[in-house]
Image (spheres, rainbow, N blue to C red):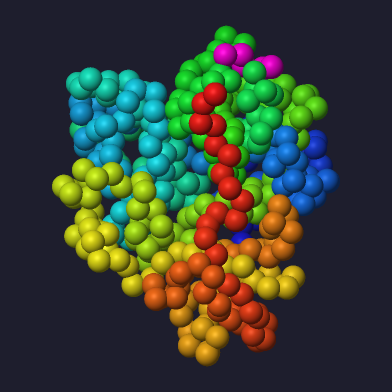
Amino acid sequence: MAETAASLQHTPLHALHLRLGAKMAEFAGYDMPIQYPTGILQEHLHTRAAAGLFDVSHMGQATLVGLDAAAKLERLVPGDLAALAEGRIRYTQFLDANGGILDDLMVTRVSGAAGGVETLFLVVNAGCKTQDFALLAQALPDLKLTILADRALIALQGPAAAEALAKVLPGLTTQPFMSMRDATWRGQTLHVSRSGYTGEDGYEISVPDGLAEAFAEALLALPEVKPVGLGARDSLRLEGGLCLYGHDIDRTTTPVEAGLIWSISRRRRQEGGFPGDERVRLQIAHGPSRKRVGIKPEGKAPAREGTDIHTVGGELIGKITSGGYGPSVGGPVAMGYVEADHAAPDTPVTLMVRGKPLPARVVALPFVPARFYRGS
């Protein structure tokens, strides 16, 4: 049964969204902005051309503190956290005993890279945060888990993001990609990560709740910054070939099948020591039976999640997991899983859309090349 508006949680920016005329809807138990009056298409294109501001405060933020915290967290994820330098961020996944993905997350080593007591900063998905935090508390009882329920999370994404942020928080223009720095604004500490979920350069900024609205308004006062809702966030990440948990990755998919093998270092591949390591390492060595691929439908009809993928001869070989219109591409784009023998780029396939066969091709991801900051 759908949650009523009264039962939904609100982020610290909820009142701002309403003032800006956002169309609101339920997402992961929160009342979230889907789009603003300009619409998803314009929000998407503005982010690609300038800078979009996103409220992602529904995500879970926490710190994990204790002796050898990185090494202990490695027992639950395949990412190489031991090699993570202070101030740097690693993308990884919580896995189950079969190598299925319980959630994906970002881990930052805040302090303690030389050993001893270490502090890690975690950001997990909104829909999984309760189970993630329960897993951490149960599996790592000797570490102190602090859920940061009093902090908002604001994403600023696009080619003008660095220029815009510098007008409000100077000194972060050359901050490396996948790193976190602390900054002070109005006497309070903000955690600024150079990362994001659009394929563009940008930042995710953890802000104390009481400061969030004023900070967002300071950014929105700049002509290059416009508010962007979850609708354009989804089309941007789809064009960027980025996975959405619960759709493109879940407990039925492994990091290898999902094309996330790059997030597992050579040491972790060799040593294992994480849940499902036997299956994951076997797939790395011999290849998975299916792979996540990009799909480019011909024509204008989009292929939505759940659409069957067939060979031209009619054999069922997979399903679409995410699909829609790609504004930057100017046509429909999709991702899904197909049998490995049919995963090569330019392989012709047939999609069953509303009961009708639609020609399409397997294409390399991403649809729009990433423009992450790589340094001057």
Residue lying at the far top of the rendered structure: 187
| Name of the residue lying farthest toward the bottom | 313
Magenta stretch prevailing secondary structure: loop
Residue drawn at the location 78% of the way across and 24% of the way down: 221
| Residue 254 inside the magenta-drawn segment | no
Instruction: Name the foreground residue: 256 vs 101.
Output: 256
> What x and y, as percent, mark residue 62?
41, 33
Q: Residue at x 52, y 74 (%)?
A: 347
Determine which quarter of the picture holds residue 155.
top right
Q: Nearer the viewer, residue 252 or 301?
A: 301
Question: Is residue 121 shown left or right of residue 23?
Answer: left
Residues rendered magenta in the picture: 167-171
Within the magenta stretch, is there residue 169?
A: yes
Q: Tell me which residue sits at (61%, 75%) in the image.
A: 360
Residue 79 at least partly seen: yes
187 vs 311: above or below: above
Q: In the rendered view, tell whether residue 270 sits above or below residue 169.
A: below
Picture quarter with the C terminus: top right
List x then y, in percent, for residue 102: 37, 55
Q: Residue at x 69, y 24 (%)?
A: 164
Q: Quadrant of the N terminus?
A: bottom right
Q: How many marks?
A: 0
In the image, residue 319 lies at what x, y percent? 51, 74
Query: Could you tell whether 170 is left or right of 16 in the image?
Result: left
Q: Quadrant of residue 278?
A: bottom left
Image-based side of 142 in relation to 12, left or right: left
Q: Is residue 150 visible?
A: no
Tell me if residue 26 comes above or below residue 139 in the rendering.
Answer: below
Quadrant of the rendered image containing residue 63:
top left
x and y percent of residue 315 in the render?
48, 88
